[in-house]
Image: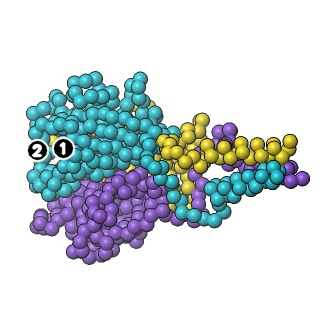
Chain colours: A yellow, B cyan, C purple
Amino acid sequence: MEPNKGLVSALFLFFLLNATIASPTPKPHIKPRPPPHHPCRHLTFYFHDIIFNGKNSKNATAAIVGSPPWGNRTILAGQSHFGNIVVFDDPITLDNNLHSAPVGRAQGFYIYDRKDIFTAWLGFSFVFNSTQHRGSINFAGADPLMNKTRDVSVIGGTGDFFMTRGVATLETDAFEGEVYFRLRVDIKLYECW
Amino acid sequence: MEPNKGLVSALFLFFLLNATIASPTPKPHIKPRPPPHHPCRHLTFYFHDIIFNGKNSKNATAAIVGSPPWGNRTILAGQSHFGNIVVFDDPITLDNNLHSAPVGRAQGFYIYDRKDIFTAWLGFSFVFNSTQHRGSINFAGADPLMNKTRDVSVIGGTGDFFMTRGVATLETDAFEGEVYFRLRVDIKLYECW
Amino acid sequence: MEPNKGLVSALFLFFLLNATIASPTPKPHIKPRPPPHHPCRHLTFYFHDIIFNGKNSKNATAAIVGSPPWGNRTILAGQSHFGNIVVFDDPITLDNNLHSAPVGRAQGFYIYDRKDIFTAWLGFSFVFNSTQHRGSINFAGADPLMNKTRDVSVIGGTGDFFMTRGVATLETDAFEGEVYFRLRVDIKLYECW
């Protein structure tokens, strides 16, 4: 019977293969959901945003460059800053100390986009050029600032982060008035090439 | 002959496997194109954009926050609004009624980017926080407004829409002057985790 | 012995299959890195950016629509143009001649985001509507302008470029003062559907 077993096993494999890989019928393109998700790369950073307020030109890392009709570009506007566009070039550090040696720059913009609560839309990059990391990670997404943690999308990357994708969790780690914000970013990458 | 058949089947499978999966030679990384594409998730929504015009402060869901040198921030500029940046926080509804219960918010911005015809560049998110959907879908792309339908990219997502990708088809469902726009969005997701 | 060989081969295949495909234990979701990367599509274009300076209204393809508090919208601001938002609708050509027949339009925006060196954040699309290409490619990322080449992410596409991803390398091919910039773009797509 052993020959038959061999044949049976081979046939079983053939059907398995057929079902799993070589299916000739068009099927929905569904990525399997690994239970649970395991990032292929996990990074944590802090970045520090000091908004220009007319007096801190030397230290400022960000500036208001757009405002609603009722605002200006030196003070964040009323109505939850709705309509303010802020451009930034912030130092990235490994710990929560603004004065630690930066390991990269967080560069991009956010737009306050809600009148009744602080919420922004973010488009930015982490740019690294050190011995440890070289390349960039690109982010986009909604940032409902009043939530303790907020998830934005990692939409791509270059260099060491070639073509990566994932989710970044933002947390406001500290703030001083409306001038200094420190964000903790937990980056989980699920596509690593 | 049966033993040989078993061997032949096994060898056939081995070559199949080898050719399909375990090829040792570097090859172009090409995703197979399933014929035709079947979305793993298909959603349709409406969202409603009411641009601030100096008089509708209470109802407005959007405001002009950037303008070309020849424009201002209360009236969309001449030359097809070229250079106007509009920030929005629009209600999302399941049907085409502005007054239906919103199921989420469409938040982000568009920039009119052409002088001779209405065309914009969009960066925005659908933000859901209901029993039905929790999480966000992030979009980016060109929106040639005069075309009946326009495709933009779904570049990522969070929560229920973790890491999703796809294409969203926008259609101007209704408009009133240059103040109210209603968009129908047909979201086809092809990567579902 | 041949039957056993058949069985052994089949079992070997079974274990191979099991290890490669049907692993029941959760594992990190890691995309294999093909050595080296081969794009599934490789395209090269030029695009031409003529910034409005108050005098070139007829030829300008771009305009300053946001500026820092210390700037205006007719002249790029001091401090490396930090805070200037520029919207563009630039012709795309196959060669480096501004007057060649355009094959598409590059539409979107950039924001100068650094005070001490020319650096920008880009969000834009290549929009094609010709016999050769129909659809759009969407880009986002940091553009450190002083580097000879800069990589940004291809974050999605529509039409002929449905759901594509990859990396685009920008190179400043020529510039005249602060009005005309010509960029060479080398687009390498690694996900083609």
The x, y position of residue C39, in whole percent, is: 49, 63
Residue shown at 17%/37% (left/top)?
A: B174
Quadrant of the image for the C terminus of chain C?
bottom left
Relative to A33, say whether A191 is above or below: below
Vertical arrangement, residue B15 with respect to residue A82, above or below: below
2 and 1 marks in contact (CB < 8 Å):
yes
Say which chain tag 1 marks.
B
Of all chains, the one bearing label 2 is B
Q: Secondary structure at mark 1?
A: strand
Q: Position of residue B148 (x, y in %)?
A: 22, 46
Q: Are marks 2 and 1 on the same chain?
A: yes
Q: Is residue C171 visible?
A: yes
Please state if A22 lies on the left or on the right of B148 as rendered.
right
Q: Which residue is at a point 68% across and 38% down the rendered structure image? A: C24
Q: Which numbered tag is attached to residue B75? A: 2
- SS for callout 2: loop
Question: In terms of sequence position, does the residue under pointer 2 or pointer 1 come before the other?
Answer: 1
Q: Residue at x 12, y 41 (%)?
A: B178
Which amino acid lies under the numbered mark 2 shown in the image of this protein?
Ile
Q: Mark 1 belongs to which amino acid?
A: Ile
Q: Is residue A135 visible?
A: no
Q: Quadrant of residue A111?
A: top left
Q: Which residue is denoted by mark 1 in the rendering?
A: B64
Q: Is residue B180 above or below residue A59?
A: above
Q: Position of residue A8 (x, y in %)?
A: 76, 43
Q: Residues within 10 Å of mark 2 (few under 14, many from 20)?
A: some
Q: Can you tell which mark lies on residue A129?
A: none
The crowd level at tag 1 (other Cα within 10 Å; few <14, some 14-19, many 20+) is: many
Q: Is residue C22 above or below residue C76?
A: above
In the image, residue A127 lies at what x, y percent? 45, 56
Q: In front here: B144 or C46?
A: B144
- Of residues A76 and A153, the one drawn nearer to the viewer in this rendering: A153
